[in-house]
Image: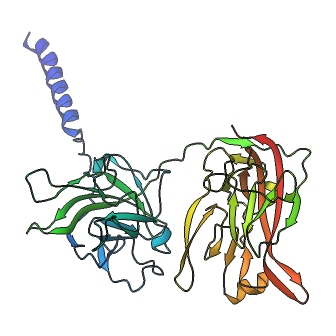
Amino acid sequence: MKVKFLVPALLVGLMTFTSCSKDDNKEEPKPKPTPEKTAKEIKNLDASDQQKWTYFSFETGKVVEVTNPKTSDNWDIAFNRFNIRTNGGVSGIGEAEVVNTNSKDFAAITKAPAEGYQKDTKVNEYGRPLPGQTQPSITEVEKNPVISGTVESTNPKGWYNYKRPKEGENAPHFEITKYVYVLKTAKGDKYVKIQLTGYTNDKNKSGYITFTYDFLREKEAPKPVEKVALDFSGNEAKEVQLDATGDWKYFSLKNGEVTPVKPEEDLSWDIAFKGYYVRLNGGTSGKGKAEALRLEEKDFAKVIETPKKGFEKDKEVIFKSMKGTESKENVSPVLTGGFGSTTGAIQINPSPEWRKKNGGVFGPNEWVYVIKTADGTYAKVQVTDFYKKIGDKKAPNFPKLKYQLSKTKSE
């Protein structure tokens, strides 16, 4: 009888042993690796000197010495009190530009935004009247308007906002917004997120900047660009060479002729030239609907459509001569060229290679632009030359314009 119960007992024991062995052989789940912390904090960077800019390189993670910030690409961002420059636009030769993510959560920003970036510009700052004056003083500053601090802004988007002392108090107040910004570096190959969190050092002296930054390895996919098909059927491409050696020459693309006009009042002109300055009948230059968009294309025939957005109207621009004098002109900032302009219609370049190619220091960049005429009709234009042969010499300020009107009107 005992033998009859021995086998079941052995089987139970064997099953128990086997079950335990299987459990023992199971591997424990490995803990997920902790993401590497790559963000760096810079504490109390000294930007307190009102007469000096402090230049910083994200690549080296250090303050850098810059002899000429306009011609150097070894800096990305610069600080002067609450003002900030980046190496792009009017401040430098780099490709730096900035966008406000509108987030204050540093960790939440994991990708660089696809659009919305802005380069440095010239900004007028208003201060206390100078001795003997009653009007506020005006100072022109080159800086990035997206990230720079503001003064008494009702909706501050820059990193800092100054507030007047409250009644009964002497000390001014400032607010640090703690927005996270994304900056394209000077060399254009990397993106950095940055959050500024401090303006005073351990001794409560102002002008000492604390910020955290980190490189972003991904960029958001751009949103689909809404485009408009351009119907050129029945309208052939035409060419005209204008004499822009004197005052403005106003030209009608529809009539194909120079038009004597009161430019601010009528719609009989579309585009105008004075040297390498260009105007369109819109914005500050006229009451028409004209505005311009530069395409990344130099083959005139290939342009058969245009983005719906991105056009820019004329505005007042300050130009500085080689002698340091200034002049103000209402121009198209898209089409107007000049020294070093690679996006305008005409560039001035003294290099031997450029002079050999174009016959002088002036030359067309050959971009194709889409413009809206005074009544809103789309047209494409391209400046193909800037010289006219007079006798044995080639004279500048004779822009040769290739253009074609479409049948498509903007909304």
Which image quadrant for residue 284?
bottom right
Foreground of the two, 204 or 249: 249
Which residue occupies 82% across, 46% down? Answer: 406
Which residue occupies 75% across, 58% down? Answer: 271
Foreground of the two, 263 or 230: 263
How many numbered marks are there? 0
Q: Is residue 115 above or below residue 66?
A: above
Q: What colouring does the structure picture have?
A: rainbow
Which residue occupies 7% across, 52% down? Answer: 168
The x, y position of residue 69, in whole percent, is 42, 79
**In this rendering, does residue 297 appear at all?**
yes
Which image quadrant for residue 38?
bottom left
> Is 309 on the left-hand or right-hand side of 162?
right
The x, y position of residue 48, in whole percent, is 22, 73
The x, y position of residue 150, in whole percent, is 31, 57
Foreground of the two, 391 or 301: 391
Which of the image's four quarters has the N terminus?
A: top left
Q: Is residue 262 above or below residue 201?
A: above
Foreground of the two, 399 or 144: 399
The x, y position of residue 387, in whole percent, is 81, 78
